[in-house]
Amino acid sequence: MPSAVPASRPSLTGTARTDVLVVGAGLAGLHLATLLARRGHEVLLVDRRTTLAGAIRTTGIFVRKTLEDFPLPEEHLGPPIRRMLLYPPGMRRPVDLVSDRDEFRVGDMAGLYQASAEAAVRAGVRLALGTRYGGRRDGVCHLSGREGPLQVRARHVVGADGARSSVARDLGLDRNRHLLIGAEEVFPVSPNGEPPAFHCVLDPRFAPGYLAWVVNDGQHAHVGVAGYADRFPDGMRRAMQRFVARAPGLDGVRRTGPVERRGGPIPVGGVLRRIGCAEGLLVGDAAGAVSPLTAGGLDPCLRLSELAAEVLDDALRTGTPHALTHYSGAALRSRFRGRLALRTGLAHIRTPAATTAAFTLLRTPPGRAAARRILFGDGSFPGQPAPRPSLASG
Ligand SMILES: Cc1cc2nc3c(=O)[nH]c(=O)nc-3n(C[C@H](O)[C@H](O)[C@H](O)COP(=O)(O)OP(=O)(O)OC[C@H]3O[C@@H](n4cnc5c(N)ncnc54)[C@H](O)[C@@H]3O)c2cc1C
């Protein structure tokens, strides 16, 4: 699909200077770059992807708190989902939870990325797609772009380059060590009269240490598995094939179009401690800003980018780069203690029998109440208060 992003293809050859170089135009990088440009700073945002509509890695489920706090463009959001079903191994007798509020919506991620990129360019961000960050030596960042190699001198560098961040390595910051791996297939569906639903299967044979899912909102079905890479009994690809063949929530659904495949690593070790130094900082997956329990990273990446924008704005305006050293994951991390403990518990459930036993607890009134609190609760990533302008507005 051709990119609809307005051409902000700065002539990038030789040497360039900028206030901030943001590496990675996922949601974290796009949001941070836009916030900084709106505050009058020079921002160069680069991504190795040649179009933001391609190589998507996420299902794109946005939770209610994000939808309330961040005015995402309505036209790029699927129908609201209120029903969630949790299946034990064997997939019989799911725990059926229905909320009286709209809990989830699946984003049309290609559209959302492109709308956010358009907003970034309108705000003044120089966006260079098809441009790979290759490393940083002696304060100079080395990029290779459509027009050849480029050297960038930036007052600060931001690693928004995902779970396996090269910028984190080059800045000597912490790196994600505790990762799940996930994959999914997405296909268009025709509505079958069923209300939109989110089906989660807990079975270590399909999803060791995490879960397998079907999200069917009547427009698209996302069918996926995720877990610890070394614990899939016969590899993730086979687990995916086995799951697709018997996944719940697809009865009577006729697949009407081509299948899109997505996937990637998911950091679940909690926010990293050292995510900022005088030279730059990390946001999004690069900073480990993902809920260790639900593996949701879209809300955390938006909120942490808000915080990062405040800190960078302060450092740039006051000319005190050391302000960035106060951008620390340690305080945020302590707020995740409970979720980290639950993640450790989930990682230890290794057999179908143990998972089935856990469902006995889940079926009790306190078990259901706890599940509702986690899945439909008001908790979100601790960070900045709600932002104002729409992600896609100018
Ligand atoms: C299969 C799967 C499903 C998921 N589903 C959900 C979900 O439904 N809801 C949810 O909340 N979270 C979900 N997550 C997690 C969520 O997608 C991430 O936490 C979130 O997208 C992170 O955004 P980001 O901007 O930090 O990173 P990314 O979106 O990964 O963006 C990083 C960008 O950096 C670019 N990049 C990397 N290296 C370089 C380089 N050297 N040079 C230039 N560019 C570079 C990449 O091309 C990419 O565009 C899912 C994750 C996976 C893997």
Image (spheres, rainbow, N blue to C red):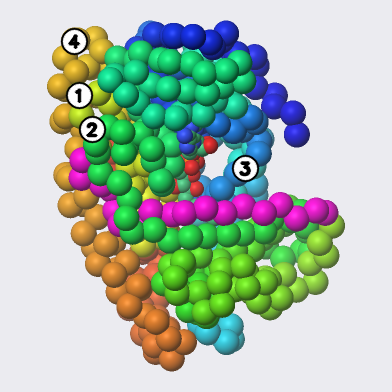
Quarter of the image where the N terminus is located: top right
Could you give the CA–CA distance between mark 2 and mark 1, rounded to whole angstroms? 7 Å
Would you say the beta carbon of the disc 4 residue lies within 8 angstroms of ligand 1? no
Would you say the beta carbon of the disc 1 residue lies within 8 angstroms of ligand 1? no
The residue beneath circle 3 is: 55
Q: Residue at position x 15%, y 30% from top?
A: 326
Image location of residue 74, percent across then percent down: 61, 35
Residues tagged 3 and 4 counted as in contact (Cβ below 8 A)? no
The residue beneath circle 4 is: 318
Could you give the CA–CA distance between mark 3 and mark 2, rounded to whole angstroms? 28 Å
Image location of residue 3, percent across then percent down: 69, 27
| In front: label 4 or label 1 | 1
Quarter-of-image position of residue 32 = top left
The residue beneath circle 1 is: 278
Could you give the CA–CA distance between mark 3 and mark 4, rounded to whole angstroms? 38 Å
Question: Within 10 Å of the Cα at label 1, are there few (<14), some (14-19), or many (20+) other Cα atoms?
Answer: some
Q: Could you tell me which secondary element the residue under label 4 belongs to?
A: helix
Lower sequence index among marks 3 and 4:
3
**The magenta segment:** 257-274
